[in-house]
Amino acid sequence: MSDHPAYAGSSVIPCLRYRDAPRAIDWLCSVFGFVRHLVVEGENGAIAHAQLNSGSGMIMLGSVSNEGAYGKLLVQPEDIGGAQTQTTYLVVADADAVYGRVLEAGAAIVIDIVDEEYGGRGFTCRDLEGHIWSIGTYDPWQQ
């Protein structure tokens, strides 16, 4: 049994940092289909904090900063040769439509679109700043 109250959305929310967070927000909304929930601007055009929704899920993001305890914990993919220690999976209704938008946006496909043995259809790509995303129709909550 969980020791937290019921949530209307996801109780696990990935957090990302972008060098050009305003551009990343526009890209994530237009290419992946996220919707702006909250965007808090910081100094000099930076994003102090943003929340983007997709269905009942959410990601949080902000501009890269080496200041503060949290900022000192993070590096960008380009700082470590494009490697990742974690990735984000985004459930979508139509993986082929998102795949088309990703290709139009010029993003790198790292695993091509395929029908998965366990169900669903999906692919893996890098976003405009190199973060790896898996996008697919497999919804573990509906299985």
Image: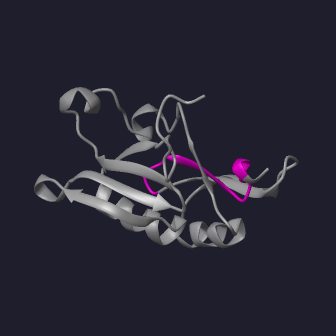
Residue 61 locus on image (x, y percent): 35, 49
Q: Which residues are magenta?
A: 128-141
Of residues 143 and 41, the one nearer the viewer is 143
x 23%, y 26%: residue: 69
The colour scheme used here is one colour
User: Does residue 71 show up magenta in the picture?
Assistant: no
How many labels were placed on the picture? 0
x 48%, y 35%: residue: 81
Of residues 45 and 89, the one nearer the viewer is 89
Residue 120 locus on image (x, y percent): 79, 56
Q: Quadrant of the N terminus?
A: top right
Residue 110 locus on image (x, y percent): 65, 50
Of residues 51 and 115, the one nearer the viewer is 51
Q: Is residue 92 above or below residue 19?
A: below
In the image, farthest residue toward the right: 117
Left or right of residue 113: residue 63: left
x 79%, y 50%: residue: 143
User: Does residue 129 show up magenta in the picture?
Assistant: yes
Q: Is residue 88 above or below residue 93?
A: above
Q: Is residue 115 above or below residue 118?
A: below
Left or right of residue 80: residue 95: right
x 47%, y 72%: residue: 30
